[in-house]
């Protein structure tokens, strides 16, 4: 049997590379312009290699009773790691994935095809434009994991964007996002303040080292109109190989401090990661 070999292709927004994992037979790492984007194990879709993906997976596990199908909207596609996870853990879920890079979507669909019957629809479109055209109250969960290179695009950081996300969610729906920042957390605080204009409940998950300002890193946010199961979420994140803290309530309000919501005219991309922050090898 021949061993899998890397696949490199110029896509719409850079050069994508799929690299096989030598330790897992049908697992692949996707990078774009050298920045890690996704990791997928085709034989074990519930395996979430990246820490931030595991934290998003924990949230997807607790937003509804186990196994209940969800209507999900994913902004940002990558290698479709979380859509595969949701299809495996909540069979029958209906999912839409919006990815601005159509060439990347084609590469992933060709090289890492979704299992038959996954009920995942792929859309090559700008995330905000697609969101603004989406119907009201059509999703149980919205996962925002959109990066232009290594930065969240500015037009996906404002109150207007968050208002559209809230509109698309059902009353019991949950908004999830992957962001990256470092102390003094001006971007992260502003994003929490922006979410607070539309949602009553906010949750932040991050490694203690990131929250203490020791390094640049990913943070995962959740927003809803109802309390989330913090106890279950804390147990799951504490059991990870790299445990994370779950912040909410008064502690999170203190963290936000005087940060102001972001207006469209003031929106900026997330910070540029320092060299090597998300490197591989």
Image (spheres, grey):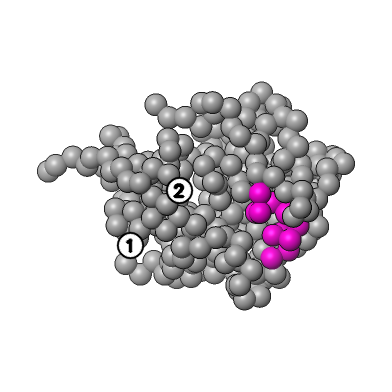
At 14% across and 42% down in the image, what residue appears? 2
> Magenta residues?
154-164
Decide if residue 73 is on the left or right side of residue 259: left
At 46% across and 37% down in the image, what residue appears? 35
Q: Residue furthest left?
A: 1
Decide if residue 216 is on the left or right side of residue 227: left
Front position in the image: 199 or 149: 149
**Is residue 103 visible in the rendered structure shown here?**
yes
Q: Residue furthest right?
A: 258
Residue highlighted by disc 2: 13
Residue highlighted by disc 1: 115
* Residue 90 screen position, x and y as percent: 47, 63
In the rendered picture of this protein, how many numbered marks are placed on residues?
2
Front position in the image: 237 or 268: 268
Image quadrant of residue 105?
Answer: bottom left
* Residue 228 screen position, x and y as percent: 70, 56
Q: Quadrant of the C terminus?
A: top left
As for residue 55 lying within the magenta part, the answer is no
* Residue 164 screen position, x and y as percent: 69, 65
Determine the CA span between mark 1 and mark 2: 26 Å
């Amino acid at each position: 049997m021949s061993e899998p070999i890397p696949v490199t292709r110029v896509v719409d927004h850079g050069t994508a590379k799929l690299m096989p994992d030598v330790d897992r037979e049908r697992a692949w790492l996707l990078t774009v312009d050298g920045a890690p984007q996704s990791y997928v194990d085709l034989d074990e879709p519930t395996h979430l290699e990246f820490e931030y993906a595991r934290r998003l997976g924990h949230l997807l596990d607790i937003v509804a009773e186990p196994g209940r199908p969800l209507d999900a909207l994913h902004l940002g596609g990558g290698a479709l790691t979380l859509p595969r996870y949701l299809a495996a853990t909540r069979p029958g879920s209906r999912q839409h994935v919006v990815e601005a890079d159509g060439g990347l979507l084609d590469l992933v669909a060709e090289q890492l095809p979704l299992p038959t019957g996954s009920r995942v629809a792929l859309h090559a479109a700008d995330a905000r434009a697609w969101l603004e055209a989406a119907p009201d109250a059509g999703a149980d969960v919205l996962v925002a994991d959109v990066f232009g290179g290594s930065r969240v695009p500015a037009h996906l950081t404002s109150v207007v964007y968050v208002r559209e996300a809230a509109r698309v969610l059902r009353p019991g729906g949950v908004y999830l996002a992957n962001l990256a920042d470092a102390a003094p957390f001006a971007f992260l605080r502003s994003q929490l303040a922006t979410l607070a204009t539309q949602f009553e409940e906010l949750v932040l998950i991050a490694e203690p080292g990131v929250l203490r300002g020791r390094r640049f890193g990913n943070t995962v946010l959740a927003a809803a109109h109802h309390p989330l199961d913090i106890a279950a979420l804390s147990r799951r994140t504490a059991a990870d190989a790299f445990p994370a803290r779950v912040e909410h309530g008064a502690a999170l309000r203190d963290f936000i401090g005087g940060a102001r919501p972001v207006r469209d005219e003031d929106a900026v991309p997330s910070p540029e990661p320092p060299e090597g922050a998300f490197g591989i090898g």
